Image: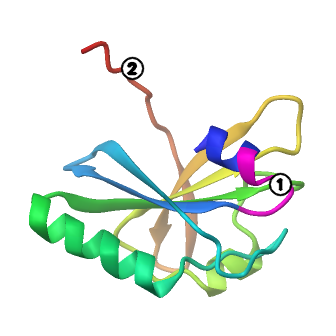
Amino acid sequence: MVEHARREYPLECCGLLSGSGWDIDGIRETGNHRQSRSKFSIPVEELFAFFRELRRSGREHLGIYHSHPTSRSLPSSRDVAEFHYPEVSYWIVSLKGEEPDVRCFRWDQRDFKNVDFEVHEDHG
């Protein structure tokens, strides 16, 4: 996610996460239909391709991510208004500071709640 955000800077990047249970182990970088510094929209054909692949592989849709090139890694009012998948995790990568700041959120009835997460390296 961080590398994707850096490549797309100064525009927002976005993508989809997959896995099983609570374990995210797949990332699909997508285009940003809006080509914007402050908005993102995953092209519908990329969403359809992602969900077709999930059905074929038996994997689950576990998350959505996007970057905030110049603002903090907190959901914006636009993020809240345009969120459509309350069952998955929501990730924001901020490039505002010296080091990238990655945060994970879950939808909780009316707003996003910050969620702690662990990163495990694959040594296999």
Which three-letter amino acid code belongs to the residue tagged 1?
A: Pro
Left or right? Give the position of 10 relative to 7.
right
Which three-letter amino acid code belongs to the residue tagged 2?
A: Glu
C-alpha gap between disc 1 and disc 2:
26 Å
| Residue shown at 72% from the left, 38% from the top | 101
| Residue shown at 10% from the left, 60% from the top | 58
Q: Please tell me which residue lies in front, 91 or 40.
A: 40
Give whichever of discs 1 and 2 has the lower sequence position.
1
Q: Magenta stretch mostly in which secondary structure?
A: loop
| Residue shown at 64% from the left, 86% from the top | 81
Count of numbered labels shown in the rendering: 2
Q: Please tell me which residue lies in front, 124 or 71.
A: 124
Q: In the image, is residue 84 above or below residue 117?
A: below
Q: Quadrant of the C terminus?
A: top left
The mark found on residue 121 in the picture is 2
Q: Position of residue 118 (x, y in %)?
A: 43, 29
Q: Is residue 31 shown in magenta?
A: no
Q: Position of residue 119 (x, y in %)?
A: 44, 27
Q: Is residue 51 visible?
A: yes
Left or right? Give the position of 41 relative to 7.
left
Q: Quadrant of the N terminus?
A: top right
Q: In the image, is residue 100 above or below residue 35?
A: above
The mark found on residue 1 in the picture is none
Left or right? Give the position of 3 relative to 71.
left
Range drawn in magenta: 7-12
Left or right? Give the position of 113 relative to 123.
right
Residue matched to label 1: 69
Instruction: Report crowding for label 1: few under 14, some 14 to 19, many 20 or more residues within 10 A (C-alpha).
Output: many
